[in-house]
Amino acid sequence: MIDSKPITNQQTITLIGAGLVGSLLAVLLAKRGIKVELYERRSDMRKADISAGRSINLALANRGIYPLEQAGLMDKVKPILTTMKGRMVHDMEGNENFQSYGQREEEVIYSVSRGDLNKICLDAAEKTGLVNIYFNQNCESVDFDSNQIHFKNAITNDETLVCFNQLIGTDGSASAIRDAIHQIESSQHDVLELGHSYKELRIPAGKNGEFQIDKNSLHIWPRGGYMLIALPNEDASFTVTLFMPTQGDISFESLDNHEKVSEFFELHFNDTISFLPSLKEDFFANPTGRLATVKCSPWHYKNKALLLGDAAHAIVPFHGQGMNCGFEDAIYLAETIDEHSNDNIDWGKIFEQVDQNRKPNGDAIADMAIENYMTMRDSVRDVKFLLKSAIGFELEKQFPSHFCPRYSMVMFHRLPYSEAKQRGVIQEEILTKLAENVTELKGVDFDLAKTLVLKKLSKVNLNP
């Protein structure tokens, strides 16, 4: 027999997925006096070790910080952040080259533990007194005619029918809510496989508890068709991720025994061997994760359902924006609700506005993330790329109201992703022109630069 659970409060939103986006959104909604029923298919990560094979480190940037500030959580989040000021690029000979992310002291990003941040958001949601969280609840199906969700408990197999008023899917790239919407609505749903996968490894802290490599950098070992990166942790360890083709001559498929893994690292990442004492064990014990982009449309169904976060726009991790984009979704919804708070709330209008605004931005960061993979695994070691980066910094100094490097627009400001992408295309044309037949910054024609910048670029509002 399936138990039935009615909704008793008219101003109640049902959320599916208590990961980062769902738990933060629950806090933001509760702060607006909205009751939240939050369902999660996994166990409570505060009581059990939950990894789900996902990256344990994420990059937190300005776009993600703003929603956390609006939720009143940054005081709790700051102690778990590790500052990263730029890329430390490691070449084949073991040489290091530091490339600053920005020009200003505050232009940094932060490494943060996914689990620790999620726990802070879950605790904050419960403390509002308006959020109920139900764990081990698999969403089996959604009936939009009767406004009911069918759940099955992953532990007991008990089944429950839950009524809802408005339903928001923050349930990740394999979203059950997205599937439910697209079963009844004419839709686009594209899963774009990158053909590359990833595997996590670990550099432990040194013998005296110290960081073994620079703690304030995102480390990259670019090797063209593949790369290794390392993000610092609070405990002086580093989370290391290998990105490479899924299949082929040099691929995860080809590294199928301990000897091949050792030979591969000795040849391509020799300077990491001494830092990876459990390399072979970790390589075969840890899962290989696939890399794919999910694009879909629509993100909503009438006044009944909305998709946010990875459920709407799963992206590859190479711009460090998956979480930041999802958090931006959450605050955009919350602030859109504020705009309608003096009226009888029309959820259909709210959901449509979120869809129309966030869909182009989700698509834009998805595209830029794939482009940044090429930058990280290859371009960062190219002298022309470094020259164009230097020219970009100089143009930012000379024309701050018109020119901001694309990376800075994405990471340090809240300019819409779609605008950052559009401006980035124009700026790349300008940089390419200025870098022609030039080998160093002092050879650049800055009179031409002024003409190009003022002609081709409008003034930029970096934090609308």
Image (cartoon, rainbow, N blue to C red):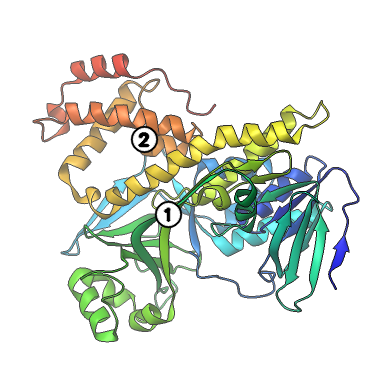
Residue 108 lies in what quarter of the image?
A: top left
Amino acid type assigned to the residue bearing label 1 in the image: Pro
Work out which quarter of the rendered image holds the N terminus and state it: bottom right
Tell which circle, 1 or 2, labels the residue nearer the N-terminal end.
1
Residue 52 location, quadrant: bottom right
Query: Is residue 232 visible to us here?
Result: yes
Q: Which mark is drawn over residue 317? A: 1
Residue 140 shows which numbered tag?
none
Does residue 411 appear anywhere in the picture?
no
Asked whether, in this view, residue 422 is left or right of residue 164, the answer is left
Residue 155 spot, x, y in % from top left: 72, 78
The dot on residue 406 is 2
User: At 60% across and 72% down in the image, what residue appears?
Assistant: 50
Residue at the (43%, 45%) spot, across then down: 366
Q: Residue furthest right?
A: 8
Q: Amino acid at mark 2?
A: Arg
